[in-house]
Amino acid sequence: MAALDQVQIRKVGKRYGSERALASVTLDLAAGSMCALLGHNGAGKTTLLGIVSTLVRPSGGTVEYRAKGQAVTGGEVRRQIGMLAHSSLCYGELTARENLELAAGLYDVDGSSRAIDAALDRVGLEPRARDRAARTYSRGMLQRLALARALLTRPSLLLLDEPFTGLDRDGALALGAELGVLRDAGAIVVVVTHD
């Protein structure tokens, strides 16, 4: 499967009952680009990420995914997406390594100790914490684990909702550098942020 190299969002809207969350959003995302979605709370940023991730259906409009000019749909799209949601979505009873082994199995990617340690190194989760239950982690440590999970699959489309939340200065700088590396390698990076 070729990496996604283009996402075309056309007149996407979303309503929740009588409330309009999004109205006619049009946006082109290309390989090797980074897009920051800025706006006040309730502006629809997270809703748009949900739609682009295929987890939320738009009320109107379309999202098309392409790889080498060919349309990509369904499970093939989902395999190409790495996502960091508002909550960590990590299993508290599992260790960092176990959380990543589970993700690797679900996405059919390399879940070897070496690959998992590399992902945890990339986000700066300390080696001494990797074999502890995630429920014992601070907010920043959980954020690092969730980021490692999102990066483990080497996604061609990376969707990050407030990725800097809970990270200390060093963690935020490391994440910024990692996002630059991914973009330079051809990934499409979309970041929702207040920073």
Image: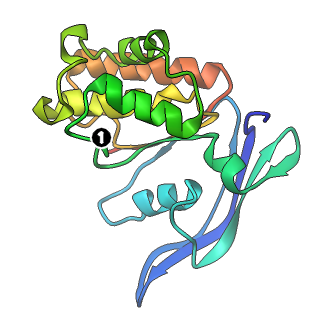
Please name the residue shown 29% across and 42% down the image.
88
Residue toward you, 52 or 149: 149
- Residue at image coords 25%, 37%: 165
User: Could you say whether the residue bearing mark 1 is in a helix, strand or loop?
Assistant: loop
Residue 4 figure quarter: top right
Is residue 184 visible in this depiction of the protein? yes
- Front-most of 127 and 178? 127
Mark 1 neighbour density, 10 Å: few (under 14) some (14–19) many (20 or more): some
**77 versus 54 height, above or below:** above
Between 160 and 102, the one lying in front of the other is: 102
The image's colouring method is rainbow
Task: Answer yes or no: is residue 28 visible.
Answer: no
Q: Which residue reaches farthest right? A: 69
Give the percent coordinates (x, y) of residue 98.
Answer: 33, 28
Residue drawn at (14%, 29%) of the image: 137
Q: Is residue 25 left or right of residue 41?
A: right
Residue 140: percent from left, percent from top: 20, 29
Residue 6 placement: quadrant: top right
Which quadrant is the N terminus positioned in? Answer: top right
Vertical relation: 166 (above or below) 23: above
Q: Position of residue 164 (x, y in %)?
A: 30, 33
- Kind of residue at badge 1: Cys
The residue that mark 1 highlights is: 90
Compared with 165, 62 (above or below) is below
Residue 16 in the image: above or below residue 89: below
Question: Residue 115: percent from the left, percent from the top?
Answer: 49, 14
